[in-house]
Amino acid sequence: MATETPGENVRVAVLGTGIMGSAMARNLVSAGLHTTTWDRSPAATAPLSDAGAQVAASPAEAVHDAQVVITMLPTADVVTSVIFDSGVAEALAGGAAWAQMGTIGLAETTGIRGRLGEMRPDVMFVDAPVSGSKGPAEAGQLLILASGPPAAAAAVRPVFSAIGRRTVWLGEAGQGSRMKLAVNAYMSILIEGVAEALELAGQLGIDDSKLAEAIEGGPLDAPIADAKLHKMERGDFAPEFPLEWALKDVDLAISAAGGDELPLLAALSRQWHAAVDAGHGREDVSAARLALGPHQQP
């Protein structure tokens, strides 16, 4: 008797195939799910066709028979444009689940949820931003911070299992975005802390590798901090999580908290805005190092 691959009859669409979305699509194909992709840039979807995904000419075409739709788009404005201005909301199948997995802000997520609910009450909206960057995305090891109607959990389970190591359900839609802002605030402070510790070490005549050695294996050795320390040490700023998107998340957190309530994040935001203005926005978030001391570049 033939054994059915889990989720093989699930049809999923991925809208937005940048660093994260393309990795998700590859893992969905590898898991045996029928996967259709769309991106504003045809160059972003061409390799996915070679990997076995279908490529749609429009976002509405991509979603018309999908049971689960993933959006991995950079901002709320882009999500709104794709979903509501390109015919996607109307094209969604009845009973489908839309998993909004980019980090777009709390108020924006709530607004989109309400707008979809008025137009398509038969579609389940899942607010499910992810924690993790290029490496975890490629390995299918993302942490998914999911929130939405209880009925959606079963619908998205095969999809989330293919792209994530763990899904945490947090309640009604909007709770996922709240948690993501807190998680990314924590991450951003760690990364800026690593950059400034390396800057201080250099000013004190301490070799970068010796600082890494002193921290390695101890209570201060957080995996993300260790990974970014070594990227900074090597001068490797190839994007895993671009600085401009990390800064976007910091600013969303500050806005959600009411402006002046987070003084450390506010200072970090100013520093990272300077780094982005200096041309480092498309580099990895570890390029925060380049905005400090003699490492500054024009």
Image: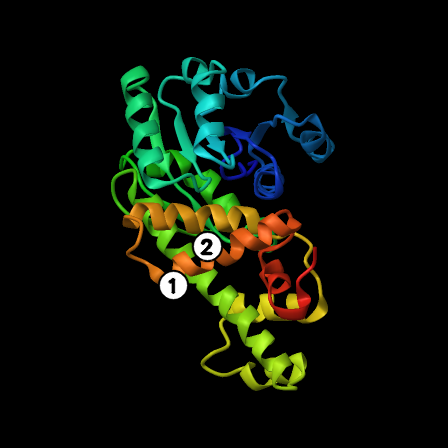
Residue at image position (44%, 42%) is: 103
Specify the quadrant that holds the N terminus.
top right
Residue at image position (54%, 71%) is: 196
Disc 2 residue type (three-letter)? Ser
**Position of 83 compared to 289: left or right?**
left
Q: Which mark is residue 269?
A: 2
Q: Can you identify the residue that label 1 sits on? A: 264
Residue at image position (45%, 64%) is: 189
**Position of 200 compared to 207: left or right?**
left
**At which x and y percent is residue 221?**
50, 76
Do we see residue 242 in this rendering? no
- Judging depth in this view, the residue of 204 and 132 nearest the camera is 204
**At which x and y percent is residue 76?**
43, 32
- Say what secondary structure mark 2 lies in: helix
**Position of 283 compared to 112: left or right?**
right
Q: Crowding near pointer 1: few (<14 within 10 Å), some, many (20+)?
A: few
Q: Is residue 181 above or below residue 30?
A: below
